[in-house]
Amino acid sequence: MVDSRIESNRLDATFAALADPTRRAILARLAKGEATVNDLVKPFNISQPAISKHLKVLERAGLISKDIDGQRRPRRIEATPMAEANAWLEKYREFWEVNYKRLDSLLDIMKTAETKKKSEVKRK
């Protein structure tokens, strides 16, 4: 079993990395296939050093990895941290889904009672 502090640190790093829209856009690009820093600079209106800093944050969070291919250093997306974040979020989605179902049931009961009350008023 994974130590909860380690799991928490990984989730913290993942969500911190995902908090920035440029990093999310970089991940969206890497979801289409690996890319070098120069490939990633093109669609953004920021410098190569700025992209490199974003890539370091993504690498530290484990969201991307770097290969060495001669002079090239292509980055690729890594699935595990996103899967862990999704699993964490899923627990809360399930919690809210159960609560929404209970609320729907209560609203149905209230609507039925209101309809019954109105029909009784009409009969009088």
Image (cartoon, helix red, strand yellow):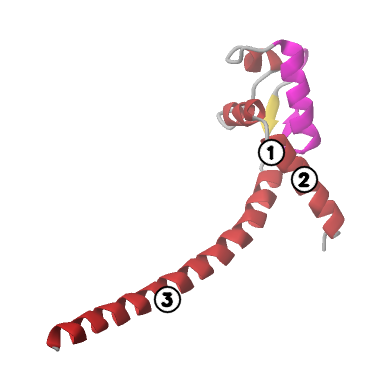
Viewer-side label of 1, 2: 2
**Residue 123 vertical position relative to residue 3 in the rendered view, above or below:** below
Amino acid type indicated by mark 1:
Glu
Q: Earlier in the sequence, mark 3 or mark 2?
A: 2
Magenta region: which residues? 47-71
Q: Which residue in the protein does label 1 denote? A: 78
**Residue 15 vertical position relative to residue 58 in the rendered view, above or below:** below
Labels 1 & 3 near each other (Cβ < 8 A) = no
Residue 69: which quarter of the image? top right
Horizontal relation, residue 115 to residue 42: left or right? left
Q: Which residue in the protein does label 3 denote? A: 106
Viewer-side label of 3, 2: 3
Q: Earlier in the sequence, mark 1 or mark 3?
A: 1
Considering every residue shown, the one lying at the far front of the view is 124
Identity of the residue drawn at 86% across and 59% down: 3
Considering every residue shown, the one lying at the far bottom of the view is 124
> Horizontal and vertical percent for residue 110?
36, 77
Identity of the residue drawn at 74% across and 32% down: 58
Instruction: Name the quadrant of the N terminus.
Output: bottom right
Q: Look at the image and say whether residue 57 sits in the magenta stretch.
A: yes
Residue 121: which quarter of the image? bottom left
Amino acid type indicated by mark 3:
Leu
Identity of the residue drawn at 13% across and 87% down: 123
Q: Earlier in the sequence, mark 1 or mark 2?
A: 2
Which labelled disc corresponds to residue 12? 2
Horizontal relation, residue 52 to residue 46: left or right? right
Amino acid type indicated by mark 2:
Asp
**Residue 119 vertical position relative to residue 23 in the rendered view, above or below:** below
Residue 68 shows in the view: no
Q: Looking at this view, is 46 or 78 the one in front? A: 46
For numbered disc 2, what is the local secondary structure?
Answer: helix
CA separation in Å, label 1 and label 3: 43 Å
